[in-house]
Image (tube, rainbow, N blue to C red):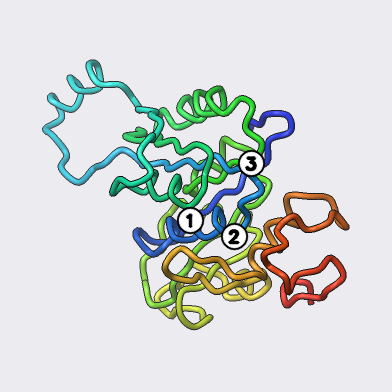
Amino acid sequence: MRGELPNMKIVVVGDHSRNIGKTSVVVGLIRGLPSLDWTAVKISSHSHAAEPPPGEARARERTEPSFLLTEEENPTGPTDTSRFLAAGARRALWLRRVQDSHLAEACGQLLDTLQGAGHVITESNRVVEFVKSSVYLMVVDSAQPDFKPSAQRFLHRADALLFIGPRSHAAGWPAISAHLLERKPTFPARALGEASPDLCEFVWQKLHEPGVENRFPHLSNLSPGKEHPWQR
């Protein structure tokens, strides 16, 4: 069962391969929709880059926490969570060193910490298994042949795809249905922490009932009655 809190809306930004720009998407949406008073969350899986010997691994499991949840306070630091604060997030949390077998527990503690938050944006794919999202965006780059198992598993749940570079079905994705990709709304994944006006409006309208007045007048070309590419 996926967790949720009353009156809280969650935007999840995932990707199909590592380090292709989902942090920039989160920063762009925080900047593009500042009235939503975001709480931003970065989730980092347990690193397997340097696996210890089996005996040492079991010892570490008994002595180390299965995950760490901390709050960022420095908006000028070098971390992704600092970037969230600098972009305008009200709070920035980092859930890290999450072991796969403890992700459900970690998400439960995260939801407890998020009590009172109205709008949450988080980087992850697997979190959608344990947290009910209002909007799930996936960043994809057809130049990258890797397609993470978590992205394959949850691709069908994505509300829209954010393409880096040209929109095309990579020949290196034999396990991915081209039809599934083609029938989803798509937007460009802009660099440097920017989000397109169309993406901002798409997210806004997914978070609110149809016909709600836009609350970001700085995007002056948007209006409730305008037809946008994602609506066609």
- Quarter of the image where the C terminus is located: bottom right
The residue singled out by tag 1 in the image is 27
Viewer-closest of 141 and 180: 141
User: In this view, which residue lies farthest toward the top?
Assistant: 62
Q: Which one is earlier in the sequence, the residue at label 1 or at label 2? A: 1
Considering the numbered disc 3 on the image, is that residue within a helix, a strand or a loop?
A: strand
Q: In the image, 174: left or right of 53?
A: right
Viewer-closest of 98 and 218: 218
Pinpoint residue 74: horizontal percent, then vertical percent.
Answer: 35, 39
Q: Which one is earlier in the sequence, the residue at label 3 or at label 2? A: 2
Task: Give the vertical position of 35 relative to 145 (above or below).
Answer: above
**Distance between mark 3 and mark 1 Cα atoms:** 14 Å
Say which amino acid is labelled 1. Answer: Val
Say which amino acid is labelled 2. Answer: Gly
The residue singled out by tag 3 in the image is 119
Task: Give the vertical position of 156 relative to 140 (above or below).
Answer: above
The residue singled out by tag 2 in the image is 32
Q: Residue at x 43, y 70 (%)?
A: 191
Considering the numbered disc 2 on the image, is that residue within a helix, a strand or a loop?
A: helix
Pinpoint residue 53: horizontal percent, then vertical percent.
Answer: 11, 32
| Dot in front, 3 or 2 | 2
CB of mark 1 within 8 Å of CB of mark 2? no
Q: Please rate how many residues cluster around mark 1, counting C-alpha atoms within 10 Å: few if below 14, some from 14 to 19, many from 20.
A: many
Q: Which one is earlier in the sequence, the residue at label 3 or at label 1? A: 1
Say which amino acid is labelled 3. Answer: His
Viewer-closest of 190 and 186: 190
Q: Residue at x 13, y 34 (%)?
A: 52
Q: Residue at x 34, y 60 (%)?
A: 19
